[in-house]
Amino acid sequence: MSKPFLSVERLTQSFPDGAGGTLTVFENASFGIEKGEFVCILGHSGCGKSTIMNVLAGLAEPTSGVVKMDGMGVSGPSLDRGVVFQNYSLLPWLSALKNVTFGVKARYRDWSRDKVVDHATRYLAMVGLEGDVIHRKPSQLSGGMRQRVSIARAFANQPKLLLLDEPFGALDALTRGTIQEELLRVWSKTEQTVFMITHDIDEAILLADRILLMTNGPFARIAESVEITIPRPRVRTEIVEHPNYYAIRNHLVQFLGKRSKELAGRASDGASQSPAPVRIDLTAPAEDPEPGPQTGPESGREPRAHLKAVNG
Ligand SMILES: Nc1ncnc2c1ncn2[C@@H]1O[C@H](COP(=O)(O)OP(=O)(O)OP(=O)(O)O)[C@@H](O)[C@H]1O
Ligand SMILES: [Mg+2]
């Protein structure tokens, strides 16, 4: 099989634990992301999600292991990788528009001023910011508007990889819902590769092609990669009607509620730790049973759940 667009190979991160010892956050974690994929990562607080993302962004050096994007090793920050943090991180002295044009100018140095402004204005419009509001400074915008500017800014730079660390964590549920749909719209138009951290299971199902499930730390593992077998385009109010929605949701809830603890705290003994692929599809026609044990969260129900878990 060819290498994925983003390939994380045997990533290990340890920190001094403050008491003279070492805290191993994760060890030998390996996974890949395909070009254009939208991948979410779910796991309890402190398991190491932001640590992984900082390494992918080139903002932190791992203890060992490599990250390759398009076959090239990642080291140091780059305009090819855009990051959106939970706390907006807009430049407070610039207007919303200038916060976006700032990065676009740096990325496309040969573009005329008009082209830069047109481009930035188009991305702001995609997240619902149009007219006078784009000339306001961050302090004159609501939290939701600020986060829209952050998203427009990240997408407008057209990075090869977009990294989002709980971008909607501070928003109320209504604003969050609207911005999730705007994010989906921008993503579907741009076909960028996205890696996003979230604590919200429903948000992950709405947005992701695949959800990576992380166990608790220390020695956290990305234990599973769950495919979201719900067709796009997805609309929040409609996907809950899809037969796979609650089957997938229950699997995620079970993992976070129970298995993330049971699987926690085991050293890798030098082995590469890849997530087991999991596919739950209640709409697939029942196949002839294959030799060997079949696992399924709903076994005995018709149509039967196809849950494939291959330990890698
Ligand atoms: N620079 C650092 N020095 C020492 N320990 C660190 C450092 N950065 C992170 N850690 C530790 O690594 C572990 C993982 O932290 P991380 O921020 O990646 O968690 P997280 O999964 O993003 O949590 P949350 O969901 O709360 O944001 C934590 O125990 C944290 O204390
Ligand atoms: Mg974090």
Image: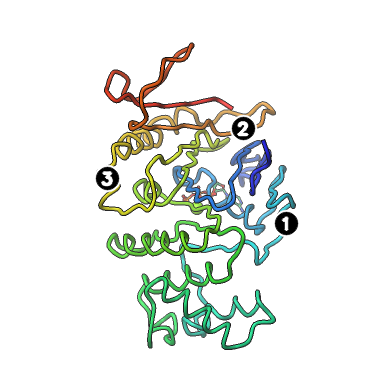
Specify whether residue 212 is in view.
yes
Mark 2–mark 1 distance (CA, rounded to whole Å): 22 Å
Residue 249 percent location from the top left of the image: 34, 38
Element type where label 3 sits in the image: loop
**Mark in the foreground, 3 or 1:** 3
Q: Residue at x 46, y 15 (%)?
A: 290
Specify whether residue 13 is in view.
no
Question: Which image quadrant: the N terminus?
Answer: top right
Identify the disc placed on residue 273.
Answer: 2
Q: In the figure, 168 relative to 225: above or below? A: below
Q: Amino acid at mark 2?
A: Gln
The answer to whether residue 284 is left or right of residue 72 is left
Q: Residue at x 48, y 85 (%)?
A: 95
Identify the disc placed on residue 299.
Answer: none
Q: Which residue is mark 3?
A: 240
Label 3 neighbourhood size at 10 Å, few (<14), some (14-19), many (20+)? some
Q: Amino acid at mark 3?
A: Val
Q: In the figure, 157 relative to 140: above or below? A: above
Q: Residue at x 51, y 43 (%)?
A: 47
Residue 13 percent location from the top left of the image: 65, 44
Check whether the beta carbons of the residues at disc 2 and disc 1 lie within 8 A of each other: no
Q: Does the beta carbon of the residue at mark 1 sit less than 8 Å from ligand 1?
A: no
Mark 3–mark 1 distance (CA, rounded to whole Å): 41 Å
In depth, the one of 82 and 34 nearer the eye is 34
Q: Amino acid at mark 1?
A: Ser
Q: How is the image coloured?
A: rainbow
Which numbered disc, 3 or 2, marks the residue that appears first in the sequence? 3
Q: Which residue is mark 1?
A: 75
